[in-house]
Amino acid sequence: MNFTASKNRYNEMVYRRCGSSGIKLPAISLGLWHNFGDVDDFNIAREILLNAFDVGVTHFDLANNYGPSPGSAEINFGKVINKELSSYRDEIIISTKAGYYMWPGPYGEWGSKKYLIASLDQSLKRMGLEYVDIFYSHRPDPDTPFEETMAALDHIVRQGKALYIGLSNYDPQQTAEAVELLESLGSRCLIHQPKYSMMVREPESGLMDVLEQKGIGCIPFSPLAQGLLTNKYLQGIPKNSRAEKSHGFLQKTAITPELVQKLVELDNIAQKRGQSLAQMSLSWVLRDPRITSALIGASSVSQLKNSLACLSNLEFSDVELRDIDALMPV
């Protein structure tokens, strides 16, 4: 299949510097956690990826276990990057991760050097790539010494299999310790990927300060709280929604009447801003200059474009922020 990217692909996107590094990322990045596995329609996934790049989304975020089935998102992404985006590889930031369960036995998850290096080798084969731009430790390992995990990440960069190091799901103290260890090895952490949204605000209690002090970028995942911060659930649980699916992290029990009422009130604030609830939720995450990029998912091209429209209104009044804080306190 032939694909020629739009000559205007960089005209509308906002790019933000990643901490104190030389890298800039699009304010909206595309994550392949859902909708790109072998249970999904490959043609739709392909259209989302190509349309994203066509409007300046230059960062695609994966992990070894994304699918389902685990690994299938990397396989499908590899088909697109090698068949249609190969000539644009130097314009694209690709990230992947290792830390969660991937294969049986004692070496198939967590943070050992054995697992991290083997996992990245498998990821590169699945995607058909020589290197990724960012490789993350997907979660801290309570049993493996941080010295070993950080040494493995440093080794991977020195091998040329990744250009930059990232951390995900590390708390403030763990992040500070990991960053110091990397620095002692002569490496640095480029970026941190925490769970952060109007509904999940823990990163405001210390993590953001650590990242700012260390010059590390921040790219929150689940800024729409698995779809809760959209108009999908304002009337309950619709068919074919994420909460209806047997797989995934969002379950029906999370959709309480009290939560729905708060979502309705948030939607009223968004409407007054001329935005959808999803657009306002993304704008809210991006309101903080310490945030490099918001990591979104998309199940269709229309959903992708709807999310990108948040970039036209990133400013909040003090009253709006106060009203949001009252509904979704820290």
Image (tube, helix red, strand yellow):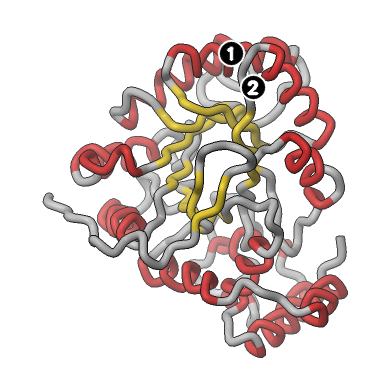
Mark 2 sits on what residue?
110
Q: Give the position of the C terminus as an image quadrant.
A: bottom right
Query: Residue 152 shows which numbered tag?
Result: 1
Whether residue 204 sits left or right of residue 141 in the image: it is right
Viewer-proximal residue among 239 and 93: 93
- Residue 101 lies in quadrant: top right
Q: Residue at x 39, y 45 (%)?
A: 37
148 w.r.t. 8: above or below: above
Task: In the rendered view, tell whether residue 256 sits above or below residue 60.
Answer: below
Residue 172: where, in percent of width, then height? 81, 36
Judge from the rendering whether residue 3 lies leftward or rightward of residue 253; answer left or right.
left
| Location of residue 81 in the rendering, given as x and y in whole percent from the top left corner | 28, 41
Disc ID at residue 317: none
- At x 59%, y 64%, the residue is 227
Within 10 angstroms of label 1, few (less than 14), some, or many (20 or more) residues? many
Residue 108 appears left or right of 13 = right
Q: Secondary structure at mark 2?
A: loop
Residue 105 in sight: no
Q: What's the amino acid at mark 1?
A: Ala
N-term mark: 2 or 1: 2
- What is the C-alpha distance between the residues marked 2 and 1? 12 Å
Residue type of the residue flagged with mark 2:
Trp
Q: Mark 2 against mark 1, which lies toward the viewer? A: 1
Residue shown at 66%/74% (left/top)? 315
Q: Quadrant of residue 279?
A: bottom right
Please say whether residue 174 is visible from this viewpoint: yes
- Residue 174 appears at what percent x and percent y? 79, 28
User: Where residue 313 sits in the image (x, y, percent)?
Assistant: 58, 76
The local secondary structure at tag 1 comes to: helix
